[in-house]
Image (cartoon, rainbow, N blue to C red):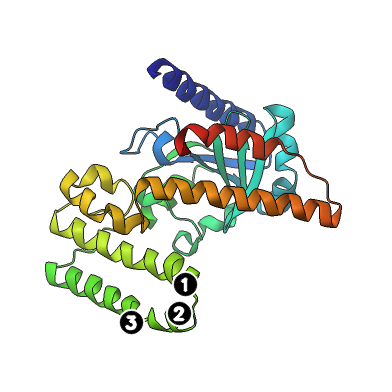
Amino acid sequence: MGSNISERLERIRKLIKSLQDKTYSQGEVLAFIVYGSFSEASDHKPTEYSDVDLEIVVKDENCKDYLNNFRSWFESNFEPVLIETSVGYLEKIFVTNDFVDLQFHITPLSDFDRIENRAINYFPNGYTLSFDKTSLLDNKIKASIKPKQQKTSQQKFDEINNAFWYFVLGIPPYFERKEYWFAAAGYWAWLYVALCKLLRVYYKKEVEYNPMKHIEQALDNDVIERIQPLRNLETVDEMKHKMNMLIDIFSEYTHKLIKQEALDYNPEIEEKVKNRIKSILS
């Protein structure tokens, strides 16, 4: 198992290096940045499930065309894409046939004129500037990283406490209107963030972003066991059961819609993803 993971991580690192080399040869590309666990500056080591956060900085006048043609360029130079999607400002997310999750930020150079206004700003968490043809970006990035403002214990507590009770106060209308889905999926997530912040402050395990991430490694097992039912609103077995149920219902209505509207459908994504996760959800 260990050798398989090592091989997979090496495969991903080689892909990142190839992307870096190929983009360097493109005249419209000005810089290439690696974020997250695959960055040399990251505190976290990548795992077999780690996604790959990359930014490609393009000349302003070429950015739109580059974004539109990016998938065809990627597939002709590297490999087929199994899944292409987008999430908010992440306009190009590719998943390969062996489930490498590549998240591309394709941005114009002018984004770096006011870094503090960018939709993404991962720089305080660490980054690797693989190349910069302008020789200007690293100084701009470093100048944008402001020293963390130190807060007193009282300030931290007041901020967390007020946010928590504010969101608790917001729940009743959704129960009254029987909008349980939003109450659980939306407000519950905010409340859990507040709880995780409070626990991290108490146990002196604070982080700058996303207090839920890696909390299982940050806190003692007895604390994690206590909050586990809150996190999922269910046991692990119940969560697996509900995830399988969700997948089955989604799949059922996908096929009903295909038949109803006479749509084209390639079952490859569904089959491959189900096969990938079946051992986890069984």
Residue in the picture at 30% in, 59% down: 230
Q: Amino acid at mark 1?
A: Tyr
Judge left or right: residue 23 versus residue 9.
right
Q: Amino acid at mark 2?
A: Tyr
Judge left or right: residue 247 versus residue 192.
right
Q: CA distance from mark 1 to mark 3?
A: 15 Å
Q: CA distance from mark 2 to mark 3?
A: 11 Å
Residue bearing mark 3: 169
Q: Amino acid at mark 3?
A: Leu
Which numbered disc flags the more N-terminal residue, 1 or 3? Answer: 3
Classify 6 as above or below 36.
Answer: above
Classify 159 as above or below 71.
Answer: below
Which numbered disc flags the more N-terminal residue, 1 or 2? Answer: 2
Question: For the residue labelled by badge 3, is the local secondary structure a helix, a strand or a loop?
Answer: helix
Question: For the residue labelled by badge 1, is the local secondary structure a helix, a strand or a loop?
Answer: helix
Q: Residue furthest toward the right?
A: 262
Q: Which mark is residue 174?
A: 2
Q: Nearer the viewer, mark 2 or mark 3?
A: 2
Does the CB distance between marks 1 and 2 fall below 8 Å? yes
Question: For the residue labelled by badge 2, is the local secondary structure a helix, a strand or a loop?
Answer: helix
Residue bearing mark 1: 180
User: Foreground residue, 173 or 151?
Assistant: 173
Does the CB distance between marks 2 and 3 fall below 8 Å? no
Classify 179 as above or below 98.
Answer: below
Classify 254 as above or below 22.
Answer: below
Q: Position of residue 158 (x, y in %)?
A: 19, 75
Judge left or right: residue 220 versus residue 24.
left
Q: Is residue 133 visible?
A: no
